[in-house]
Image (cartoon, rainbow, N blue to C red):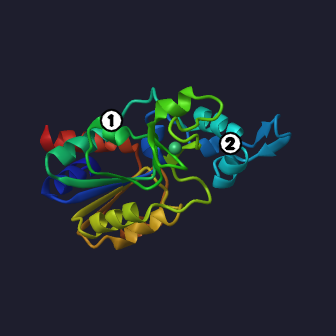
Amino acid sequence: MTDIEKLAAILSQSSSAVFFGGAGMSTESGIPDFRSATGIYNQKLNKKFSPEEMASHNFFVNHPEEFFAFYRARFVYLDAKPNAGHLALAELERRGILSAVITQNIDGLHQVAGSKVVYELHGSIRRSYCVQCGAKYDVDFIMNNIPIPYCEKCGGIVKPDVVLYGENLDNEIISNSIRAIAAADTLIVGGTSLIVYPAAGLVDYFRGRHLILINKTATRADVDAELVIRKNIGATLSEAVKEAFG
Ligand code: ZN
């Protein structure tokens, strides 16, 4: 039996599978990891900043104009399309096999592919809100209102609904994710090296039968996994779904 056949067999027996995905899922849609940018010299501020500094809450508050320039250039990829993996997961949900997608990515591509239950641990570029009155805006508002997007209702700054460095993850999204993982019969972890906490610790809540790791490099959960596949996440999921359901 090949790994794809094994994965297909597990999926066809599952009824509450959960997918937990990381950056690998997005890079396969052509979205680079923003951390791959090296220190950026900001002429206006006359200083060099790391990508993490520029994506921090402090930077957003103290240097909003520079924050938004960095954000628009490095976080927002509106032309990116869902890959075969996103589409395969949406099909698994439609077939009643997958109960939730939990993602560390902020591109919103799972919903574009058709997934309905998606827990976005780090938020989404596709939503924004006024930090002062809470009014909601879409991504275009931030892209079009240069340099700083101000709320049309109250004049407050409109912030992307993504978790910046120095900000906490949303408690409700965390508890929904834990609930889905604790109730899952199968957990597929893909495109993440399981290094970033607390998100990576979610895997510890899994009590189901089938733990599957799909990642190009080793992770700390490999030893507990029934199946470890060191290949592209998108192609692997898509081939397994084809194998299982034709
Ligand atoms: Zn407002």
Q: Quadrant of residue 224?
A: bottom left
Ranked by sequence position, the earlier of labels 1 and 2 is 2
Q: Is residue 11 visible?
A: yes
Q: Is residue 97 left or right of residue 193?
A: left
Mark linked to residue 64: 2
Q: Is residue 39 left or right of residue 195?
A: right
Rendered residue at 29%/61% (across/down): 187
Rendered residue at 33%/35% (across/down): 112
Mark linked to residue 2: none
Label 2 sits on a secondary structure element that is helix
Q: Residues within 10 Å of mark 1 (few under 14, many from 20)?
A: some
Label 1 sits on a secondary structure element that is helix
Q: Position of residue 165 (x, y in %)?
A: 61, 56
Q: Is residue 157 left or right of residue 208?
A: right
Which residue matches tag 1? 112
Determine whether the beta carbon of the residue marked 2 sits less than 8 angstroms from the nearest atom of ligand 1.
Answer: no
Q: Is residue 74 left or right of residue 92?
A: right
Which quadrant is home to the C terminus?
top left
